[in-house]
Image (tube, helix red, strand yellow):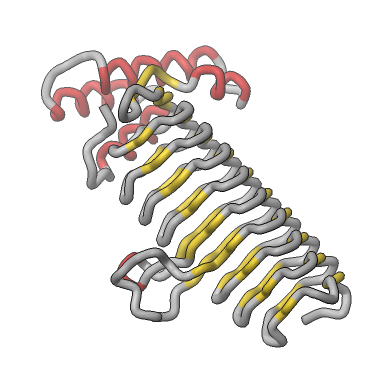
Amino acid sequence: MTDAAAIHPSAAVDPSARIGAGVSIGAFTMIGPEVEIGAGTSVGPHCSISGPTRIGRDNRIHGHAAIGGEPQDKKYRGERVELEIGHRNTVREFVTINRGTGEGGGCTRIGDDNWLLAYVHIAHDCRVGSHCVFSNNATLAGHVEIGDHVILSGFVGIHQFCRIGMHAFVGMGAFVNGDVPPFVMVAQEGYGRPRGINGEGLKRRGFDAARTAAIKRAYRALYLSGGSQEEIRARLAEIAGESEDVRRMLEFVEAGQRPLLR
């Protein structure tokens, strides 16, 4: 532990925890053994951080967050499993993030510059990219993979082992039980259903008209053209020859172990 940290007298910090320079820890917060918190990070009051957990620099963790808890998995038998969180993430009140499981790779990972709003839950063995926004009460079951720049609206639920590709948008209250390709927008209708591409999000991130048009053609090939899976993949491959974005969509589809959300 470093002397440069500002730790409230009521906080309980294990002597083995590694606390970086400029870290602040609020009242009644518990920091367990094998926890590492990078420089400039702030941890609010009434939080719990259990290890093994590594948290990077300049994160903002608000009150009552529970980070690094044991996985909610009946197969977990106390084996050593970890949580890794990158830099400059905002974690709001009552967020829960669990460590991995031995059968799931042993580690839950979260990238950089994400916003996790109140009551978000990220379960064991999830992989979350960077620059994502998870709105209030968004929930990931175990083994979910989320690409960069994904937005999950409030009360979204993602089924275990599903993948959400980069720049996708999932609308409020949608339950997702299949893979969502990059750039696709999902709307609530019982279970979530694809409803076009995330055009507004792509515009905000600087995608020009040509890039967006190629992604629209790929979406139509995936969801509107009909035909066999082989024919759909062939159409995607044709479009991918002129678009790196569509190549990413094709690679996502070909790597999937679960059906696409439809």
For the N terminus, which image quadrant?
A: bottom right
Residue at image location 56% in from the left, 75% down from the top: 51
Q: Nearer the viewer, residue 12 or 262?
A: 12
Corner quadrant of residue 20: bottom right
Residue at image location 31% in from the left, 33% down from the top: 250
Q: Is residue 97 above or below residue 217?
A: below
* Rendering coords of residue 127 (x, y %): 45, 54
Q: Is residue 163 above or below residue 228?
A: below
Residue at image location 28% in from the left, 45% down from the top: 255
Number of numbered discs? 0
**Does residue 79 appear left or right of residue 208 in this picture?**
left
Q: Nearer the viewer, residue 37 or 140?
A: 140
Q: Is residue 23 above or below residue 170?
A: below
**Does residue 155 appear left or right of residue 39 in this picture?**
left
* Rendering coords of residue 106 (x, y %): 40, 70
Q: Nearer the viewer, residue 203 or 81?
A: 81
Residue at image location 48% in from the left, 53% down from the top: 122
Q: Residue furthest bottom?
A: 15
* Rendering coords of residue 40 (x, y %): 80, 61
